[in-house]
Image (cartoon, coloured by chain):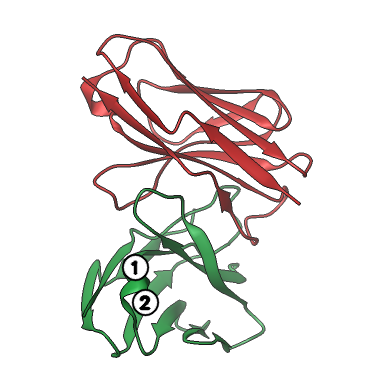
Amino acid sequence: GENVEQHPSTLSVQEGDSAVIKCTYSDSASNYFPWYKQELGKGPQLIIDIRSNVGEKKDQRIAVTLNKTAKHFSLHITETQPEDSAVYFCAPGGSARQLTFGSGTQLTVLP
Amino acid sequence: SQTIHQWPATLVQPVGSPLSLECTVEGTSNPNLYWYRQAAGRGLQLLFYSVGIGQISSEVPQNLSASRPQDRQFILSSKKLLLSDSGFYLCAWSVSGTVNTEAFFGQGTRLTVV
């Protein structure tokens, strides 16, 4: 099955600074690389995803970059705002039948 | 459009009592269905997943069981709850046949076993 490692587990940044979260995976068949955001007391929601034929994708202040050779992809959040505070999960899709999520990153944006 | 319903939102149950959490999906057919548990507000522990009616795979040995009596219905059960069963339970679905697609989560059930 897929082995997924996500770092860091916690991240605190000042409002307006950038945040980067990294996800490493093991399954070379993975070709779908999403990031989910989970706000307190709610289920995770997809915020951005990328497929293996693309190296980078941006959506306003968030971006995902992919390095298939090194088997890792990263979430970048620029100009962070307090509402970005949440837990973020990666979930690389591979050849397994079940979804595998990273361990999560608690992002805190300090005002 | 597709929607996922999960209930109840919160539940307080005594140790030794039974449990039944229900999840239903609308607007799609033959979805992959998942039950996750989240302790301490962080990691998502996969409990069960199902690729079709009556097909349940268990990821970890535990005090819980799952059933899929209908295509878009997924039920999490226990005959006798333990204190360690407390947590935030999430149901999710994705398009069948692949994990290379978005997962859609319900709003979760906060279970407290007392």
Amino acid type of the residue tagged 1 in the rendering: Gln
Q: Is residue A100 above or below residue B71?
A: below
Find chain A in the image and tell me its colour: green
Q: Residues within 10 Å of mark 1 (few under 14, many from 20)?
A: many
Judging from the image, mark 1 belongs to the subunit labelled: A
Is residue A5 toward the left or the right of residue B6 in the image? left
Picture layout, residue A36 above or below residue B21? below
Secondary structure state at the residue bearing disc 2: strand
**Badge 2 amino acid:** Lys
Crowd tier of the residue under label 2, counting other residues whose Cα lies within 10 Å: few below 14, some 14–19, many 20 or above: many
Q: Residue A29 location, x and y as percent? A: 60, 67
> Relative to A59, is B49 above or below?
above
Query: Is A32 in front, or is B19?
Result: B19
Please, what secondary structure does the residue beneath circle 1 have?
strand
Pointer 1: what residue? Answer: A6
**Chain under callout 2:** A
Do badges 2 and 1 share one subunit?
Answer: yes
Labelled pair 2, 1 in contact (Cβ < 8 Å): yes
Left or right of A83, for residue B22: right
Q: Report which residue position mark 2 lands on.
A: A22
- Chain B image colour: red
> Distance from label 2 to label 1 (Cα)?
6 Å
Q: Which is more N-terminal, label 1 or label 2?
A: 1
